[in-house]
Image: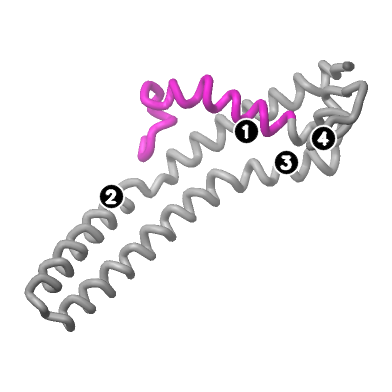
Amino acid sequence: MLINFEAAFFITLVSIVITTLVVIVSARLSQQKHKNKLMEEIKKYNELSKDASDVGAEGLYAAYQKQGNEKLMHYFVAIYKEAVVEMALHVLVLGIIQRYYSVNIIKLPVSVWLIGDGVGSVTWYIISALFFFFTVIKPLKPKVRFFRPNWV
């Protein structure tokens, strides 16, 4: 087993920088307040439609269900926007790495199923970014204000 330490260090450093940047940008552009407001409205319409159903007012029930579904759609759009913000920079960097710095970080002596003959730079980036996020960023998120939503 051969390890390319220079490439591993470079890719790990890039993943740490990009992951930190993504967490800061994501927290800055967070729509948490908007999502909380939408969730309150969804719950309100859910209760109103349940009351209308209990009373037997089918027209009112349908109207409240429609309004609740519209709010739910807006909630899912907000979640989607946050996911795009969180993933866009990683996808861009992964594309650049794959195009310009596609090397084997760990070269295995035999071909292993699902891995192949080694661990490439893209796989190493994903592993190191996830490792950094779950070991460093996630525990620090409540303590560092730049990692929390709406840190204006």
Residue 133 numbered mark, or none: none
> What residue would you read off at disc 3?
94
Q: Horizontal and vertical percent for residue 21?
A: 56, 34
Q: Amino acid under label 4?
A: Trp
| Sequence-first tag of 2 and 1 | 1
The crowding category of the residue bearing disc 4, from other C-alpha atoms within 10 Å (few below 14, some 14 to 19, many at least 20), is few
Residue pointed to by mark 4: 113
The residue carrying pointer 1 sits among few (fewer than 14), some (14 to 19) or many (20 or more) residues within 10 Å by Cα, namely: some
Give left or right: position of 106 versus 32: right
Residue drawn at x 69%, y 46% as measured from the top left:
92
As drawn, is 72 to the left or to the right of 19? left
Question: Is disc 3 in contact with disc 1, using a CB cutoff of under 8 Å?
Answer: no
The amino acid at mark 1 is Ile
Q: Which residue is mark 1?
A: 18
Residue at position x 21%, y 58% from top? 43
Magenta stretch containing residue 62, yes or no? no
Q: Quadrant of the C terminus?
A: top left
Residue 127 inside the magenta-drawn segment: yes
Q: Which residue is mark 2?
A: 36
Q: Does residue 85 appear in the picture of this structure? A: yes
Q: Which residues are magenta?
A: 124-152
Distance of mark 3 from mark 4, alpha carbons?
23 Å
x, y percentage for residue 51? 11, 68
Looking at marks 4 and 1 on the same chain, the residue that comes earlier in the sequence is marked by 1
Say which of 81 and 111 sits in front: 111
Q: Secondary structure at mark 4?
A: loop
Residue drawn at 63 percent across, 26 percent down: 16
